[in-house]
């Protein structure tokens, strides 16, 4: 049971959003723009992967499964592959650019000041643009919020990981502005 | 210098949202709703939570600007802000506010750190569900804002006078700055 009475049975952040729609509006709009808007040189799959990895580092079960399933859906791979990336992205089958961006995201998870000039230079060497670096930092920072919101209020989450995999195609189609 | 090419001389998050207004719009909408919208917590109390979490995240820009806004809102009692940032347990604030700041401090560490006992303690001091919700989401949101501001190494003024002006402007509301 969540720490507060949400007056609904929805899992994770969805229960919080139904409880407080005034704050849900900008939160959902931010997620849609950051993760799903197509005017972006990072693919939806790459952006969901950054969200998944940060949620894993923040130990947020709900977020890492929702977004892990979405990353798998977009990147056309199963949950085992996503788990391998979370476990050690450096040895995973990812581009060098993506690895340099995940390294920046991991530093953001620890604290903003943990991002070094060297990490930025390494990402640039792999042709990461200013906008890609910006979006990586903001996605990582946003998940440091979403994860704390979900766990800080003790929300419930289905334990069966298949639940998230089954829902991913519909969420990918609906996006974050249509909640059903 | 910032890690990416943002407008020069513009401080903190302002420079970042000018670089990327598509996401900036929703970040400002969120700040406006959380800190200026309807809530059982006063605007001064909400700015105080923001400054407290920003201090714990070692984000000088957010701590200084939100402390300045909180001082404006506390008026004659502006000394409360520095007392809380110095040691909230000995500050002249209600036991309820201390219990909420304690929860905000837990959220700053990680969502899962908030315990049933922390929630009970706040409830025993009269905290409502909505106050608990808003406290957790404000604390979580500043774990995002702080990482965004420092993760991209945005310009951080050191002159206290600069923050005094910022605080006055912030009290009027959070509006996306015009494009340069």
Image: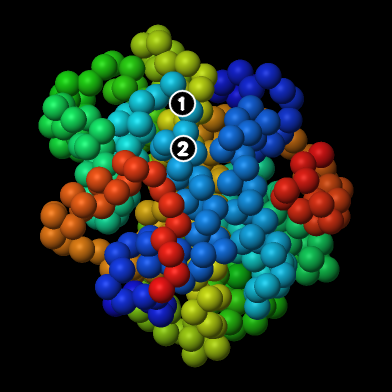
> On the rendered image, what quadrant is the N terminus of chain A found in?
top right
Q: Which residue is mark 1?
A: B39
Chain ID for label 2? B
Q: Secondary structure at mark 1?
A: loop
Q: Is residue A63 visible?
A: yes
**Crowd rating for badge 1 (residues with CA inside 10 Å; few <14, some 14–19, many 20+):** some
* Scheme of colours in the image: rainbow
In this rendering, the answer to whether B116 lies above or below B172 is above
Q: Nearer the viewer, residue A43 or A87?
A: A43
Q: Quadrant of residue B74?
A: top left
- At which x and y percent is residue B168? 25, 45
Residue ID for mark 2: B34
User: Residue drawn 35% across and 31% down?
Assistant: B43
- On whether disc 1 and disc 2 are found on a single subunit, the reply is yes
Quarter holding the C terminus of chain A is top right
Relative to A133, say whether A145 is above or below: above
Residue A146 percent across, percent down from the top left: 56, 46
């Amino acid at each position: 049971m969540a720490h507060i009475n949400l007056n609904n049975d929805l899992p994770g952040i969805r229960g919080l959003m139904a409880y407080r729609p005034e704050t849900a509006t900008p939160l959902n709009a931010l997620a849609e723009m950051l993760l799903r808007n197509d005017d972006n040189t990072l693919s939806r799959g790459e952006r969901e992967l950054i969200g998944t990895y940060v949620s894993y580092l923040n130990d947020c079960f709900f977020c890492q499964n929702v977004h892990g399933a979405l990353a798998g859906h977009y990147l056309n791979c199963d949950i085992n592959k996503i788990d391998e990336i979370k476990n050690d992205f450096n040895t995973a089958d990812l581009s060098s650019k993506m690895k340099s961006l995940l390294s920046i995201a991991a530093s953001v998870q620890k604290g903003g000041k943990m991002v070094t000039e060297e990490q930025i230079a390494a990402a640039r060497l792999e042709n990461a643009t200013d906008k890609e670096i910006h979006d990586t930092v903001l996605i990582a920072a946003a998940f440091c919020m979403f994860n704390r919101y979900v766990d800080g209020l003790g929300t419930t989450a289905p334990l069966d990981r298949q639940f998230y995999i089954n829902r991913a195609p519909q969420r990918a189609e609906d996006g974050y502005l249509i909640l059903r | 210098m910032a890690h990416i090419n943002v407008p020069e001389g513009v401080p903190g998050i302002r420079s970042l949202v000018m670089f990327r207004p598509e996401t900036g719009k929703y970040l400002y909408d969120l700040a406006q709703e959380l800190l200026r919208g309807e809530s059982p917590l006063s605007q001064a109390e909400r700015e105080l939570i923001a400054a407290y979490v920003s201090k714990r995240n070692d984000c000088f820009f957010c701590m200084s600007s939100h402390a300045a806004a909180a001082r404006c809102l506390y008026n004659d009692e502006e000394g409360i802000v520095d007392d809380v940032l110095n040691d909230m347990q000995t500050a002249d604030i209600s036991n309820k506010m201390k219990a909420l700041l304690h929860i905000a401090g837990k959220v700053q560490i990680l969502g899962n750190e908030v315990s049933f006992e922390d929630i009970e303690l706040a409830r025993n001091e009269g905290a409502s569900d909505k106050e608990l919700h808003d406290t957790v989401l404000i604390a979580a949101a500043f774990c995002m804002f702080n990482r965004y501001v420092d993760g991209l190494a945005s310009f951080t003024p050191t002159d206290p006078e600069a923050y005094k002006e910022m605080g006055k402007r912030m009290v009027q509301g959070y509006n996306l700055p015009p494009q340069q």
